[in-house]
Image (cartoon, grey):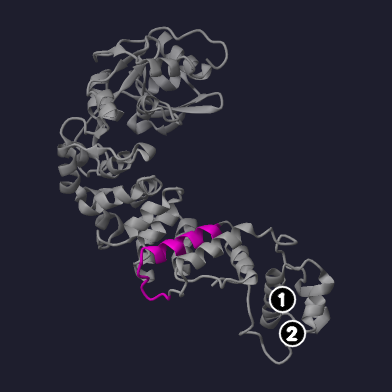
Amino acid sequence: MDGQHDWPVAGNLSDVAAQQCPPKMIKWLQNLDSKLLSIINTIAEEGGGVWIVGGAPRDVMLGADVTDIDLAVDFDPQKMLTIFSDAIETGVDFGTLTLRGGDSMYECTTLRTESQYVDGRRPQIVNWGTSLEQDLQRRDFTINAMAIDVSRMILHDPHNGIDDLERGVLRAVGHASLRLAEDGLRIMRAYRFMDRNEAGIWYPDNNLAQALSQKRTMLSNVAPERIWNEFKKILSGKNASVVLALMLKDGVLDIVLNSEWNLASPIFEAISEFTVNNADYLSVLSILLSETDRDQIVDLLNDLKVSKYERDHVIGTVSRMGHLPNNVIGEIRVHRHVLGEQAANHLQLEYLIRKFSIVLPQRPSDEFSLQQIEQLINKSSELPPLKPNGKSILDGNQLMNLTAITRGPKLGHLKSWLHRIQIERDIQSEQEMIQILSTIVWQNSEGDEWPKVQFP
């Protein structure tokens, strides 16, 4: 354990059959943080029952890192607030508080029963309860419907989630159509849980597979922000191409992105190769949208309610598709300076576009062979950092003194032109830049056509 702390006293027993925790789970429990153990002990000493639920039992059995630990308790929220006065009321109407445990936070939810999911988004009625059995019955998938009694080191698994974990099967708790009808977001969660990264794909059983297609219109009741939060996790998976293809086959991808897709498109093969070494969800989304008209892409991203950064990133990535720097050191330096950390990613995407013959609508595709792009990738990766970090050596005030040009567009154009030359040649001397100024013809133009620090 983290620090010295007595093991928690036993809280209330649940109404669910129990089994001894598997050895892997016991080992994990023995190393729980002492602050969490203190929270569990406090609830038990007050006469309550408390269990670890949600993704933690699942991830422990999968050998994955447990990033969040959620608790279920049989005290109502008001009782919990009297015990933990510093708790954060994150969703008190639905019985959820966030408890402080040192530097960690633990989401804690009162056992509940729900009914009348009128809008397919949230329960119309929430009743506090003391039945762990009923609480687990309302959860989405069997692998998420387990509960650990820490003090007794026993596992409650009424829906055989452990068996499904061992078989690699995704199965709904109870009737799949009912579970999805209660909350349309569970459709997205199902596809997310299918991707087990290095372990491959866990396919849904027949009941869930049919329900995913039949209930797909329930997604129209879900807030776009919630859909995007799940979708970007899907795009981040190692097997994103397979999951996206399944979403397309089930008619779900058309709803999520409000567009039509072709399963025979090479974009799915390109995504499959890209995700072997990358988990960049925005690049995966860019590949997915590479055959879509740019104006439509803007609308799709706005409908998804992505952040401004995410929208600009995808639009920028897609707008650069089909463009490559010439295979000369100067242009490669400019390319890397302009794109920064995204330079290598851009070259990789260009390689995939050509390898899989992706058609870019209304965008040119330069005539580069795969071998030439590989050479570009190698050259770019081997270039040393620019001096002095690529920052412009001559500023506007210096240029005004040297040229008598006043502030305005022409001065900005000249500064950008000189900065580009500086980057291309990797110059670090102010004197050398002044000498270059004397060799270029800038007097007889307003500079609109001069080279700029940009790509493409």
Main secondary structure of the magenta stretch: helix
Quarter of the picture containing the C terminus is bottom right
Does 318 sit left or right of 16 as displayed?
right
Q: What's drawn in magenta, residue-wise?
A: 342-364
Can residue 179 be spotted in the picture?
A: yes
Q: Is residue 46 above or below residue 163?
A: above
Which three-letter amino acid code belongs to the residue tagged 2? Ile
Find residue 42 and report its horizontal and vertical position in percent. 46, 13
Find out whether the residues at labels 1 and 2 contact each other: C-beta distance under 8 Å: yes
**Looking at this rendering, what residue extends furthest in the front direction?**
371
Residue 21 horizontal/vertical position (percent): 34, 14
* Residue assigned mark 2: 440
Visible residue check, residue 398: no
- Rendered image quadrant of residue 102: top right
Q: Which numbered disc flags the more N-terminal residue, 1 or 2?
A: 1
- Name which residue lies at 43% across and 51% down: 281
**The stretch drawn in magenta includes residue 362:** yes
Could you say which is closer to the camera, residue 346 or residue 304? Answer: 346
SS for tag 1?
helix
**Residue at mark 1:** 418
